[in-house]
Image (spheres, rainbow, N blue to C red):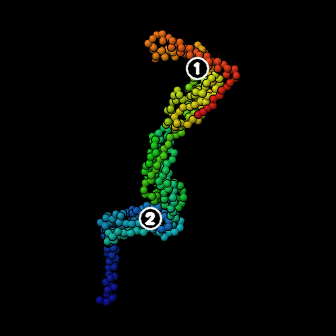
Amino acid sequence: MSKRSLIERMLDKWPAKIICLIISIFLYIFHQTSIIDKRNIVVPLKIVENGLVMHVGKVPSTVSVVVRGNDSDVKSVVPSDFEATVNLDEITEKGDYLIPVKISLSEKLMEFDPFEVKLKNHQVEVSVDLKDIKYVELVPSVVGEVAHGYTISSIEMNPSFIEISGAKSILDKISHIDTTKINVSNAKNTFSTDCEFLQVSKNFTIEDINPAKATVIITPLEYEKQFENNSVQILNLDDNFEIVSNLPKINVTLKGTMPDLEPYEPGKSFVQLDCSLIKSEGIYSIPVKINCPKKFQLLSKSFDTINLKIKIKRIDELDNDDENQVNEQEQIFEPADENLKNENKDKEHKDIMLSKVEGAVNNMIQKENNISVNITDTQ
């Protein structure tokens, strides 16, 4: 067949042939469209930062991927079949960068044919900063109240400092790390407990993984208490003498721990005057003695000494005292013979009267000679 005849045959009824060709193309496209499906898949975005910098601020956590293929193949695709990454390892300076997103396909997807993958966003904007390491103080977080009368004198942390890492601009703003809560409710004694680190932000990493130990040292509070209008107890005053001056009330201030001192109430012997050195009439300056437990410290007392005016008791008072003494002796000793009993009574009475008279005379002589006796504190 010659070329001429071939051309003539091709041009024969050419409009119909062109229409058939166009219809064939449309049929092919329709067929291909009917067997190929399209789907959008959201894939997690991973940031690789093993170099000198790390990302700061917000970075997209996902990217969108468009896949096309056979309907059965497309329906079997899951997000885990893709790995989307942004690599910062080659960046060495702080700044803002547009980083390309790389997509890796699983082996299953590589076997699909036909199969098409397309990223909607090929780049993401990332702010980066230089990495840094810092040691900061570990601060205990305390909740509750210790028992009444006690206080937390200190809390010892082990370790006292911990290592954190992250972006330098973020670490510069961190001065300490708090612990989880340490409950001290109604505690009276020192105790130890384990506690975790409280990380309130994901922008830095705490390198220490072991829990810390907190030792809470609890001590009693110091406390001062005033005791007012305390009566004075007289000790060792000879029965022949009497105090004719008025005794003042004494105010005393003590210091101790609150649990011990707060409930303490003094007894009758709290304030005392020792009159053992008084041997005659006169005015005596007697030191005030405070009797309290050794665990308390005496801060003050309203009187260091008290002036006592001492006189000899009157004869009739002495007679009464002697008769009482004789009666007491009679109750103890009862002679068998009544006459012997009366003689002993008279003799004892005379001896006592004689000694009292001699004492009174001596005191009068001392008084006339203006003898003054002062007793200082021998304690």
Is disc 2 in contact with disc 1, using a CB cutoff of under 8 Å? Answer: no
Residue at the spot 57% in from the left edge and 35% down from the top edge: 298
Q: Is residue 372 visible?
A: yes
User: Which residue appears farthest toward the top when viewing the image?
Assistant: 339
Other-residue count near label 2 (Cα within 10 Å), few / some / many at <14 / 14–19 / ≥20: some
Give the image quarter of residue 365: top right
Residue at the spot 43% in from the left edge and 61% down from the top edge: 61
Query: Would you name the residue on which mark 1 appears?
Result: 240
Q: Position of residue 102 (x, y in %)?
A: 42, 69
Q: Which structural element holds mark 1?
A: loop
| Rendered view: 63 above or below 11 | above
Task: Give 15 or 80, whichever is nearer the viewer.
Answer: 80
Q: Position of residue 38 (x, y in %)?
A: 35, 65
Q: Is residue 30 visible?
A: no
Quarter of the picture holding the N terminus: bottom left
Q: Position of residue 309 (x, y in %)?
A: 63, 22
Other-residue count near label 1 (Cα within 10 Å), few / some / many at <14 / 14–19 / ≥20: some
Q: Position of residue 23 (x, y in %)?
A: 32, 72
Residue at the spot 55% in from the left edge and 37% down from the top edge: 297
Give the image quarter of residue 2: bottom left
Task: Give 10 or 133, whichever is nearer the viewer.
Answer: 133
User: Which residue appears farthest toward the right when viewing the image?
Assistant: 369
Q: Which structural element holds mark 2?
A: strand
Query: Would you name the residue on which mark 2 appears?
Result: 47
